[in-house]
Amino acid sequence: MGPTALTFYRAAKRLQAHPRLANVVATLGDRIHNSHVDTKAVLHPTVELGYGGIGVIIAPGVEIGERSFISQNVSLEPLPGVDGVPRVGRDVYIGVGAQVLGPVVIGDGAKIGANALVMEDVAPGATVAGIPARELKQKAPPTGT
């Protein structure tokens, strides 16, 4: 993500703590939302974002844990008519083009494959892929004689 959206996002997050600056936060929020033209990313100031890089569309209220890597063309959004947005744990990898929709929880250390459609919770450390996303079972190591 370009520095413009991230800079405005961080400034708006700091200003949110000061109720008297609500107009400034609203203005920055609009600038952040419109900055996707320049940066190919949308960051609303209500998003909880851990340290790391992103290049995605993230709905207001989404939480993203530290050190999570989110590839390009990923969407983290609510489902129409359903309350709640995704919560992404720490050290999560979300592959290119994945869609994480609705009030799902992605556990710490989980991996989501490219173009997966995630509409159910993903257990910590699990790897999911497909449409809809299903957990991939790891093969047992070969036993030698």
Image (cartoon, grey):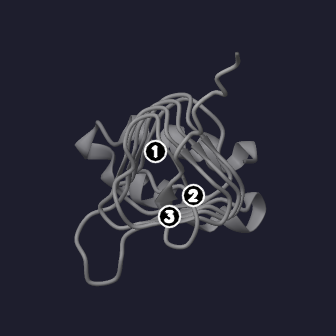
Report x, y in % for residue 59.
Answer: 44, 63
Which element carries disc 1, helix, strand or loop?
helix
| Identity of the residue drawn at 52% across and 46% down | 137
Q: CA distance from mark 1 to mark 2?
A: 9 Å
Amino acid on which the number 2 mark rests in the picture: Ile
Camera-nearest residue between 13 and 138: 138
In the displayed structure, would residue 120 be above or below residue 6?
below
Provide the residue designation for mark 2: 32
Nearer mark to the viewer, of 1 and 3: 3
| Residue extending farthest bottom | 81
**Relative side of 26 to 36, left or right:** left
Provide the residue designation for mark 1: 12
**Given contact means CB atoms under 8 Å apart, are the residues at marks 2 and 3 in contact?**
no
| Identity of the residue drawn at 36% across and 76% down | 79
In the displayed structure, would residue 42 be above or below residue 49?
below
Camera-nearest residue between 115 and 28: 115
Provide the residue designation for mark 3: 133
**Disc on the earlier residue, 2 or 3:** 2
**Disc on the earlier residue, 1 or 2:** 1
Q: CA distance from mark 1 to mark 3?
A: 34 Å
Which element carries disc 3, helix, strand or loop?
loop
Report x, y in % for residue 139.
Answer: 59, 39
In the displayed structure, would residue 80 be above or below residue 4?
below
Q: Is residue 31 visible?
A: no
Nearer mark to the viewer, of 2 and 3: 3
Report x, y in % for residue 1.
Answer: 72, 48
**Disc on the earlier residue, 1 or 3:** 1
In the displayed structure, would residue 22 be above or below residue 140?
below
